[in-house]
Image (tube, rainbow, N blue to C red):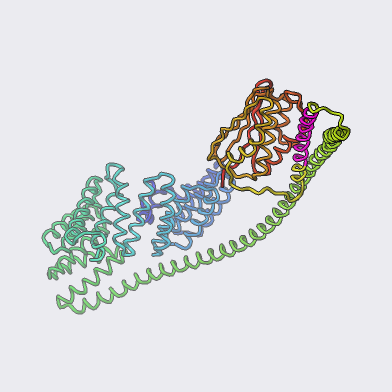
C-alpha cells in the first residue's frame, strides 16, 4: 500500500523516504558525470530535498528550477510531474501550505493533459491531505472523492482504502460521526486483506473507530442504530483489537500508546483500578523506549487519573513530569493541558501562587496554539482566495471560449445552411430533369396513342359504317332474300357491337387523360359488380361455346370506383373469350393477400407470347399491338392499356401470368374496404 492514508503520515513522509545523503557529497558530484537528463533531474531533486530538511528554501527553489530545466528535455512528462510533486511535498512537510499547493496544481494540470489517471489520483490525495491540515474540509473531501473515483476505475484497492481512511477522519473532524464510522469501516475492510491484517492501517482504523464511537452523542447513536451499552462495548472491542494488532507488529511505542488509550477509556467509565493497570503498563513501555511523546501523554493521563481521584499530590507530580517533557519536545497541546490541570491541583493543595503562575503559563501556551490556528486559518483563506482567482480566470476563459464556440457554431450553421440550399437546389434540378424526361417519354407515348386512335377511327370505325350504308341500300332496292337478310343483319350487328365497345374504350381512355379526372372510391361488393358485367357477356361467350365461371366469394368487398372496376372486368373477360378455344372456360376467383384483395380472370386459351407479356407487366403504360383471337377476332390493343390506367387510378395493380398454349391469368390487386 504505497499511499497509506497520506492524511495521517504526510508530515513524516518525505523524511522517511528521502535518502540520508550528505549534502556536500551531492554537491561535489561533477555534472559531466550526470550522463542523461533523467539522471540530472533526479540528482537535483535529491539536492533540493536535502536543503528542505535544513529549511533552506532559497536553495530549494534554486535546485528545483534546475530540475525543471533538465526535466523539460526528457521525452516523458512524468519526470516533470515528479519534480513538481516532490517540491510540493517539501513545502507541505515544512508547513508552507500556500507554497505547497502551487506545485501540486502544476503537476495536476500536466497529468490531466496527458490523461495520467493514476498520477491525477495521487495528486488529489496529496491535495486532500493539504486541505485537511488547514481545516478546509470541503475541499479536502472533494479531493479525496476525486482520487477515490479514479482509483476505483483503475482497480487500485489499496489506494482506495487510503481515501476511505482520509474521508473517515475528515468526517470525524466535522463531528459527523456516523459518516466517519462508515468510511473508516470501508478502509478497514480493505486493510484486513493485506499482511493478515497486522499492520499500521488496521491499527489506526481500529483506534479511529474507537474514537468515533466515543464521540457519538444520542442522535448519532440513533442514526447508527445502537444503544449506549453497545457503544461502550464497541469502543472497548476496537481498542483491544488495536492492542492485538500492535502486539502482532511488535511495535512497542504503539503498544504503549494503546494501553494509555485503554486506560483513559476505563477512567471515562469510572473504573479507576483497571485504568491504573493500563497506565502502569504504558509507563513501563514508554520509559524503556525513551519516547518523550508517549511519556508526556502517559504522565498527563496519570495526573488526570489522580486529579479525578482527589490525590492532588500525585496528580501534581505527574503533571509536572508531563510538562517538563512536553516543554523539552515543544508539544504545545500537552503543555496546555498539563498547565491547566496543574493549576487546578495547586489550587486544591492551597498553593495559590503556583496555581496563578501556572495559569498564566497556560494562557500563553493557549495563545501560541491560537496563533498557530489563526495562521492555519489565514493560510486556508489565502488558499481559498487563490482558488477563487483561478476559478474566476477559468470562468473568464470559459466565457471567451464559449463566445468563440458560438461564433464558430453560427458560421458553421450558415455554411451548413448554404450547403443544404445548394444540395436541395441540385436535387430539385435533378428531380425536375427526371420529371421532364418522364413527361417527354409520356408525351411521346401519348403521341403514339393518338396516332393509333386516328388509325382506328379511320379504319376500324369506317368499315362498319360503310357496311351499314351498303345494307341500307340493299334494303331500299329490295334486292335481298329473307335468308340473306338475316345473315347480313347478324354480321352487321357483330361489327357494330365491336365498334360500340371500341368507341366506349376510346372515350373512357380520353376521359382518364383529362386533367382533374378523379375516381369515386367506395366500399363495394366485388361479386355483385362482376356478376352485373358477366350477365351481358355470357351470351357472347356462348357463341364460342365458352363457359364463364364466377367463384368470387359473395362477401368479398374492396375500395373501388364501380364504373372503372366494371370496365376493367369487361375488358379482361372479353380478352379471355377472344383468346379462348371453342368450348373452353373462363374463371373469375378472388384471394386475400394481407391488406389486398386479388381478383383473377383466368382462361384456357392460347396464352401470351413472352415479349408481349413483358410489355403488359412493365411499369410503362404503352399501347399494345393487337393480336387476332382464336376465331380470327380483331382487336385494337386499347383494352389492356385502359385496364392498367384505371387499375392505377383506383389504387390497384394489374399483372399478367401466362405461358404460350397454356392459357393466361390476369390478376387485379385492390385495397380491401376501408
In the rendered view, would you say 56 is above or below 194?
below
In this image, 319 relative to 131: left or right?
left
- For the stretch drawn in magenta, the main secondary structure is helix
Q: Residue furthest top?
A: 661
User: What residue sits 27% from the left and 45% below the top?
Assistant: 198
Residue 59 among those drawn in magenta: no
Q: Nearer the viewer, residue 433 or 424?
A: 433
Residue 462 shows up from this direction: no
Quarter of the figure with residue 651: top right
Residue 133's spot in the image, x, y percent? 39, 62
User: What residue sits 69% from the left and 31% below the top?
Assistant: 540
In the rendered view, would you say 64 is above or below 579?
below
Residue 496 among those drawn in magenta: yes
The N terminus is located in which quarter? Answer: top left
Q: Nearer the viewer, residue 417 or 574?
A: 574
Residue 286 shows up from this direction: yes
User: What residue sits 14% from the left and 71% below the top?
Assistant: 312
Q: Which residues are magenta?
A: 485-506
Residue 211's spot in the image, x, y percent? 25, 59
- Number of numbered discs on residues: 0
In this image, 672 relative to 658: left or right?
left
Residue 592's spot in the image, x, y percent? 55, 36
In this image, 352 relative to 641: left or right?
left
Q: Nearer the viewer, residue 124 or 229?
A: 229
User: What residue sits 12% from the left and 58% below the top?
Assistant: 274
Q: Nearer the viewer, residue 613 or 553?
A: 553
Amino acid at each position: 500500500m504505497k499511499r497509506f492514508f497520506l492524511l495521517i503520515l504526510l508530515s513524516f513522509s518525505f523524511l522517511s523516504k528521502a535518502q540520508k545523503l550528505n549534502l556536500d557529497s551531492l554537491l561535489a558530484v561533477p555534472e559531466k558525470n550526470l550522463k542523461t537528463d533523467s539522471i540530472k533531474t533526479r540528482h537535483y531533486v535529491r539536492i533540493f530535498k536535502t536543503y528542505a530538511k535544513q529549511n533552506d528554501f532559497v536553495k530549494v527553489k534554486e535546485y528545483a528550477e534546475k530540475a525543471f530545466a533538465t526535466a523539460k528535455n526528457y521525452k516523458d512528462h512524468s519526470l516533470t510531474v515528479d519534480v513538481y510533486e516532490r517540491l510540493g511535498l517539501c513545502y507541505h512537510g515544512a508547513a508552507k501550505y500556500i507554497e505547497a499547493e502551487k506545485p501540486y496544481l502544476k503537476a495536476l494540470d500536466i497529468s490531466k493533459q496527458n490523461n495520467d489517471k493514476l498520477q491525477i489520483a495521487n495528486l488529489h490525495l496529496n491535495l486532500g491531505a493539504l486541505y485537511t491540515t488547514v481545516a478546509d474540509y470541503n475541499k479536502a473531501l472533494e479531493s479525496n472523492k476525486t482520487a477515490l473515483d479514479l482509483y476505483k476505475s483503475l482497480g487500485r484497492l489499496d489506494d482506495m482504502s487510503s481515501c476511505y481512511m482520509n474521508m473517515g477522519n475528515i468526517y470525524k473532524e466535522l463531528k459527523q460521526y456516523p459518516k466517519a464510522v462508515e468510511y473508516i469501516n470501508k478502509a478497514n475492510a480493505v486493510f484486513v486483506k493485506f499482511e493478515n491484517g497486522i499492520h499500521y492501517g488496521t491499527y489506526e482504523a481500529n483506534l479511529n473507530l474507537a474514537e468515533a464511537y466515543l464521540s457519538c452523542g444520542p442522535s448519532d447513536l440513533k442514526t447508527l442504530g445502537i444503544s449506549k451499552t453497545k457503544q461502550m462495548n464497541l469502543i472497548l472491542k476496537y481498542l483491544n483489537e488495536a492492542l492485538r494488532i500492535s502486539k502482532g507488529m511488535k511495535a512497542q511505542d504503539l503498544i504503549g500508546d494503546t494501553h494509555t488509550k485503554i486506560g483513559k477509556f476505563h477512567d471515562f467509565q469510572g473504573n479507576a483500578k483497571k485504568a491504573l493497570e493500563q497506565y502502569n503498563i504504558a509507563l513501563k513501555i514508554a520509559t524503556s523506549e525513551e519516547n518523550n511523546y508517549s511519556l508526556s501523554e502517559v504522565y498527563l493521563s496519570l495526573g488526570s487519573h489522580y486529579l479525578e481521584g482527589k490525590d492532588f499530590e500525585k496528580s501534581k507530580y505527574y503533571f509536572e513530569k508531563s510538562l517538563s517533557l512536553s516543554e523539552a519536545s515543544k508539544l504545545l497541546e500537552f503543555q496546555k493541558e498539563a498547565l491547566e490541570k496543574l493549576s487546578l491541583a495547586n489550587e486544591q493543595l492551597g498553593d495559590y501562587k503556583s496555581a496563578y503562575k501556572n495559569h498564566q503559563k497556560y494562557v500563553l501556551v493557549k495563545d501560541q496554539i491560537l496563533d498557530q490556528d489563526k495562521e492555519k486559518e489565514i493560510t486556508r483563506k489565502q488558499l481559498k482566495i487563490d482558488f477563487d482567482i483561478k476559478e474566476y480566470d477559468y470562468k473568464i476563459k470559459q466565457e471567451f471560449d464559449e463566445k468563440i464556440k458560438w461564433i464558430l457554431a453560427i458560421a458553421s450553421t450558415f455554411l451548413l445552411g448554404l450547403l443544404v440550399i445548394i444540395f436541395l437546389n441540385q436535387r430539385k434540378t435533378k428531380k425536375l430533369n427526371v420529371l421532364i424526361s418522364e413527361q417527354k417519354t409520356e408525351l411521346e407515348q401519348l403521341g403514339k396513342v393518338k396516332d393509333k386512335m386516328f388509325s382506328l377511327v379511320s379504319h376500324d370505325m369506317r368499315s362498319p359504317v360503310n357496311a351499314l350504308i351498303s345494307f341500307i341500300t340493299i334494303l331500299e332496292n329490295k334486292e335481298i332474300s329473307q335468308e340473306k337478310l338475316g345473315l347480313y343483319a347478324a354480321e352487321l350487328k357483330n361489327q357494330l357491337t365491336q365498334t360500340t365497345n371500341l368507341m366506349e374504350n376510346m372515350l373512357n381512355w380520353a376521359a382518364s387523360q383529362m386533367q382533374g379526372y378523379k375516381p369515386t372510391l367506395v366500399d363495394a361488393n366485388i361479386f355483385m359488380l362482376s356478376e352485373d358485367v358477366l350477365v351481358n357477356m355470357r351470351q357472347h361467350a356462348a357463341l364460342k361455346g365458352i363457359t364463364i365461371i364466377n367463384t368470387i366469394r359473395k362477401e368479398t368487398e374492396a375500395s373501388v370506383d364501380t364504373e372503372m372496376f366494371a370496365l376493367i372486368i369487361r375488358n379482361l373477360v372479353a380478352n379471355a373469350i377472344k383468346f379462348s378455344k371453342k368450348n373452353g372456360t373462363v374463371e373469375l376467383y378472388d384471394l386475400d393477400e394481407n391488406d389486398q384483395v386479388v381478383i383473377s380472370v383466368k382462361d384456357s386459351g392460347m396464352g401470351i407470347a413472352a415479349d408481349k407479356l413483358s410489355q403488359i407487366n412493365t411499369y410503362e403504360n404503352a399501347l399494345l399491338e393487337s393480336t387476332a383471337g382464336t376465331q380470327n377476332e380483331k382487336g385494337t390493343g386499347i383494352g389492356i392499356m385502359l385496364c392498367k390506367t384505371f387499375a392505377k387510378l383506383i389504387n390497384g395493380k394489374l399483372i399478367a401470368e401466362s405461358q404460350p398454349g397454356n392459357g393466361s391469368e390476369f390478376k387485379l390487386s385492390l385495397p380491401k374496404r376501408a
